[in-house]
Image (cartoon, grey):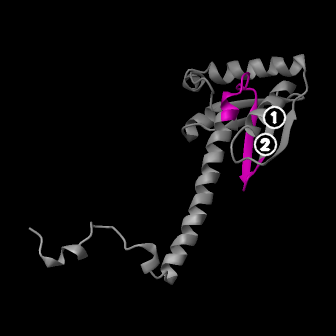
Amino acid sequence: ALGADHRQLRPAGRRPPRQHRKIGRTQRDHFVRRTVGCEQTLRDRIMREVRHEILMTPYFDVFDNVSFKVEGYNVTLLGQVTQPKLKSDIEKAVKGIEGVEKINNQIEVLPLSPYDNDIRLRAYNAIFGYPALSRYAINSRPPIHIVVNRGNITLEGVVNNELDRTLVYN
């Protein structure tokens, strides 16, 4: 049975009603930090969704390289693609993300060239045909991107270790 003081008991962690609390400096700082935290959470969500939309765009493959920057509610798209339609498809997909207000599309469309296409295929076979690097080709979106622009090859992406990096460049 509860004694006469039972009205003063409250569940652990429960705070008195707002009108009875005084907001001190640390609580105001906590509120400001929490608001900044919400902005960071929103930015993180936008970054995750932009990345997802880019990777899920049809015909985005190992020969395309797209990156992005998120500044507030604005997204800047960067990189190179092999097909002109891919540039507009990525922009449309990113425009549909909640919270994105403006898109600066700086994606470069690489020239359509049979010579460049031949170099792309040869580079793909040279890199992913090597037994030690073939595990990277298993992914639906390989982490290594081969960009060929007017005969010049640029490799973008990530590998697991320095040895794999050396093998890719040799």
Is residue 108 highlighted in magenta? no
Q: Which residues are magenta?
A: 53-75
Identified by mark 1, the residue type is: Gln
Q: Is residue 169 visible?
A: no
In the rendering, at what x and y percent does residue 135 appear? Answer: 54, 24
Judging by the rendered image, the residue that carries numbered circle 2 is 77
Query: Callout 2: helix, strand or loop?
Result: strand
Callouts 2 and 1 close, C-beta under 8 Å: no
Residue at x 24%, y 76% (from the top left corner): 8
Q: Quadrant of residue 48?
A: top right
Front: mark 2 or 1: 2
Judging by the rendered image, the residue that carries numbered circle 1 is 80
Identified by mark 2, the residue type is: Leu
Vertical comparison of 109 with 26: above or below: above
Badge 1 density bin: few <14, some 14–19, many ≥20, Cα 10 Å: many
Q: Is residue 135 visible?
A: yes
- Side of 100 relative to 35 (left or right): right
Q: Quadrant of residue 59?
A: top right
Q: Quadrant of the N terminus?
A: bottom left
Q: Quadrant of the C terminus?
A: top right
Is residue 60 highlighted in magenta? yes
The one of 121 and 88 positioned closer to us in this rendering? 88
In the rendering, at what x and y percent does residue 90 appear? Answer: 77, 33
The one of 30 and 4 positioned closer to us in this rendering? 4
Q: How many marks?
A: 2
In the rendering, at what x and y percent does residue 123 appear? Answer: 73, 23
